[in-house]
Amino acid sequence: MSLPPWISRRALIGLGAACAVLAVGPLLHDNLYLHNLLTLTFIGIAAALAWNWLGGYLGQVSFGHAAMFGLGGFVAARGEISLHLPMVFAWIFGGLVAGAYALLWGHPTLRLRGPYFSIATIGVGEATRLVGTYWDWLTGGSSGLSLPMHPNLKYTLYWYGLALAALALAASYALRRSSLGLSLLAIKSDVDAASDVGVGAVRLQDLVLFLSGAMMGVCGGFYASYFSYIEPGDMFGFDRSISWVLMGVIGGIGTIAGPALGAVIFVLLRQYLIASYPQLYLGLYGILLVLVILFEPLGLTGIALRLFHRVRPDLSVTGVAGED
Amino acid sequence: MERFLELVIASVLLAGLYATMAYGLGLIYGVLRIVNLNHGGMIMAGAYAGWYLHSEFGIDPYLALLPVGTVAFLVGMGMYRLLVHRLPRGAAGGVQSLLLLFGVWLVMRNIAYLLFTGNDQTVHTTYATRAITLAGAQVSVNRLAVFGVALATLGILHILLTKTYFGKALRAVAQNPESCTLQGIRVDRIYALTFGLGTALASVAGLLGATLFPFNPSFGAAELLKSFVVVVLGGLGSVAGTAIAALILAAVEVFPTAIPGFPTYLTAALGFVLLVLVLVLRPGGLFGQRVLG
């Protein structure tokens, strides 16, 4: 069996082993709290990685990804309720619609680099939330939508979530390590120079945007199935958009697996913070952002790289991660 | 016809506030090349400062403008020295400055929430409901006053930027910081002063806004967006461009309210649609790029 040269055998084995352990894990314990926490972590990992494709690989930070998450969630829920689509097809349907929506607003705004794009995403998020709240036909308005309950579905969704997270991680790897990843790096560093040497910047940016939006939409659909009740204020919420920014930044923005690590930390942290200090969590997010940006812009991945460098200075890995 | 005139007057009065709001954002971006995402936070802080001074000490919001602006100026300078100053310049600095200032905004929102709860607040002055007749239309005295203050602020800014040494230095730094260093201009100090000035403008706009609208700790998010629309529309730092852009945004928001049955929540989305249209059709702003002044 021969692999494309950009796939490292070690990474493949690592991902496979991690998935195997997590897949059989629930059969060995019956801790429902842990089961639930892990499922939430999977969905966080998938979403944070999808955010990172745009925010990290392309350097286009989005503060409005909840728009696609919410849209995908509601479209999937509607698909299940009104069209009687099977669950997974409903998610894919929601994902496609969310990806198309991302292209709709993103294609024009992605011409602009950096801050212009980021601020536009705040607008997208807010506008989508407002429209979503009042669009009763799709979202059920402020009373939300309830999905049909299936016994045991919530328990089973653990494995779907694991598959989703693994898929997102594999896609992150492929997007970074394949020749496509080099093109994305070139676009991130200098769009004009990249275009000059024949990188199809517009098409590639659209592709990444679509993938990111579609994955967000699928995550939204998964979330809807998992909680079997969704409500626009929560699905489209600004806090939700921020959470993915934070996962990316904590873990290491632009790195392959950093955001996944960030998602794990974030979910644990939120579980603890919301239980203990529900009034403070927004400010603590803010302080975390400020500290990471000021002291370690590559987040946990940056710290890991530094430690690694200290232990094995001969195997310096600088240049591998998504440094700016 | 009379209704039309009313709408025009309402647009013009609202545009004054929008121009003041946007100018601070445009100024900081024009000179430091940083989008101050904490702009919304300072707008919110200005609103709360005015409300607090009024409800606790009975100080008129318009008298509070100067002290609030001065404190915000110092806060902005401090924020620059403490945080923004440490960021790398260039492309990487762009993303990092966004995230950093966004973090500061979150902290400010949380502080406001802890101090004043999440409830809506309003500034009730004795003249809040008074109105005069202007060209056949009823106009709130308060809105007129806000407009007057906004005009005065922009006028002072224009003079500051075009007639003083500081203004000349600021415009020079915006054009080319390297040559400014060679000419003996202390670039870093200009950066700090500009950041302070932009921050002060945001808080003044917030204070003015508080006299017109109810607000809560997330006040400022929509205002940041509107400021951004105006900056993109009007080009950077040109007072005239900013004024025209603010007028366009205000008209886009005010006129649809005359359409019967137009859902009010959509007005918030209109500004954004305008933003995307401008970004697509005229990425350099309606009037092209301008130098500050």
Image: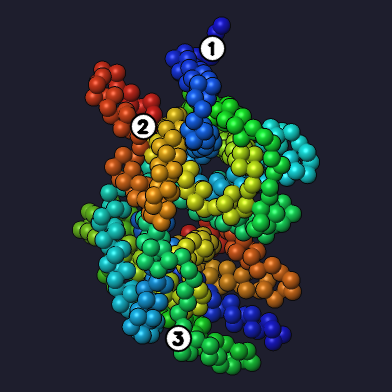
- Amino acid at pointer 1: Leu
Q: Secondary structure at mark 3?
A: loop
Residue lying at 65% horizontally and 84% vertically, measured from the top left: B5
Residue receiving disc 1: A3
User: How much space separates mark 2 and mark 3, taking CA atoms?
Assistant: 54 Å
Q: Are marks 2 and 3 on the same chain?
A: no
Q: Secondary structure at mark 2?
A: helix
Residue lying at 27% horizontally and 49% vertically, measured from the top left: B86
Q: Nearer the viewer, residue B143 or A279?
A: A279
Location of residue B191 with respect to B261 vertically, above or below: above
Q: Position of residue A31 (x, y in %)?
A: 49, 30
Q: Are marks 2 and 1 on the same chain?
A: yes
Residue receiving disc 3: B125
**Mark 2 burial class by Cα count in 10 Å: few <14, some 14-19, many 20+:** many
Q: Are marks 1 and 3 on the same chain?
A: no
Q: Position of residue A74 (x, y in %)?
A: 67, 46
Circle 1 marks a residue in which chain?
A
Q: Residue furthest toward the left? A: B184
Residue lying at 29% horizontally and 71% vertically, measured from the top left: B71
Q: Residue furthest toward the top? A: A1
Residue lying at 27% horizontally and 24% vertically, measured from the top left: A309
Residue receiving disc 2: A301
- Amino acid at pointer 2: Thr
Circle 3 marks a residue in which chain?
B
The answer to whether mark 2 and mark 3 are in CB contact below 8 A is: no
User: How much space separates mark 2 and mark 1, taking CA atoms?
Assistant: 27 Å
**Mark 3 burial class by Cα count in 10 Å: few <14, some 14-19, many 20+:** some
